[in-house]
Image (spheres, rainbow, N blue to C red):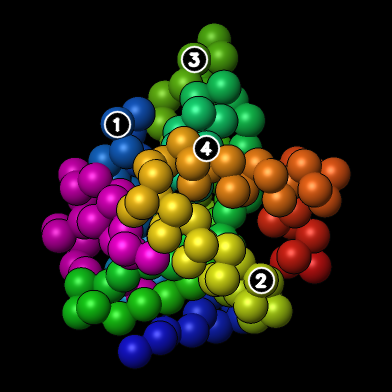
Amino acid sequence: MLKIMSDEDFIVSKTDLKGRITYCNQIFMDMAEYREDELLGKPHSIIRHPDMPKAVFRFLWETIPAKQEVFAYVINKTKNNNDYWVYANITASVDVNGKIIDYYSVRRKPNPKAIEVIAPLYKKMVEVEKSSGVDASFKVLTDILAEKGVGYNELIISLQN
């Protein structure tokens, strides 16, 4: 079953530098169908959906440690095998010396028209990953960005508006 976020909902979570959940709000727990004690200390990938390309996460993990924010459409899998899409903003939190101390993500309801564009792209990327690996899948994405003459965040943000 596909779950849909409410327009006013914001999913909030924090992870440590290894991607383990250190904080999650009630909306996160409700959407993911987990209790807090089942999420805290677990890898954020506990909600990773098999239809989500690994290449997108590779981009994310190459970008946020450089203190650059990432916007992304993500499909998640719940504890009870339901699915839900989010429009995510992921950033690094830094201390007073500029050292990254954790990662912070806020997710909200995605524009349904954006999902109509992203879902087939992700399907193609996952198929390429299965046959040719993550690098080839990432090339599918970068080729589209080059064709459109935009950066990753620019494409994602434009689809949300």
Q: Is residue 47 left or right of residue 92?
A: left
Mark 4 crowdedness (10 Å alpha carbons): few <14, some 14-19, many ≥20: few
Whether tag 1 and tag 2 are in contact, CB under 8 A, the answer is no
Give the alpha-carbon distance from disc 3 to disc 1, as whole Å: 15 Å
Left or right of 38? Residue 13 is right
> The residue under label 4 is which amino acid type?
Phe
Q: Nearer the viewer, mark 2 or mark 3?
A: 2
Q: Comparing marks 4 and 1, which lies closer to the viewer?
A: 4
Residue type at mark 3? Lys
Give the quarter of the figure containing the N terminus: bottom left
- At x 58%, y 54%, the residue is 72
Q: Please report the bounds of the magenta region as a residue range.
A: 31-52
Q: Separation of disc 1 and disc 2 at Cα?
A: 31 Å
> Residue at label 2?
117
| N-terminal label among 4 and 1 | 1
| x and y percentages locating residue 89 in the rendered image | 58, 50
* Residue holding disc 4: 59
Q: Position of residue 64 (x, y in %)?
A: 53, 31
How many marks can you see?
Answer: 4
Quarter occupied by residue 79: bottom left
Residue type beneath disc 2: Val
Q: Nearer the viewer, mark 3 or mark 1?
A: 1
In the rendered structure, the answer to whether residue 18 lies left or right of residue 7 reads left
Residue annotated with mark 3: 99
How far from the left and from the top, in percent, is residue 155? 75, 53
Q: Residue at image x 74%, y 65%?
A: 159
Front of the two marks 4 and 3: 4
Q: Is residue 21 above or below residue 99?
A: below
Q: Residue 18, labelled with which disc?
A: 1
Q: Residues within 10 Å of mark 3 (few under 14, many from 20)?
A: few
Q: Could you give the CA–CA distance between mark 4 and mark 3, rounded to whole angstroms?
A: 21 Å
Most extreme residue toward the front is 131
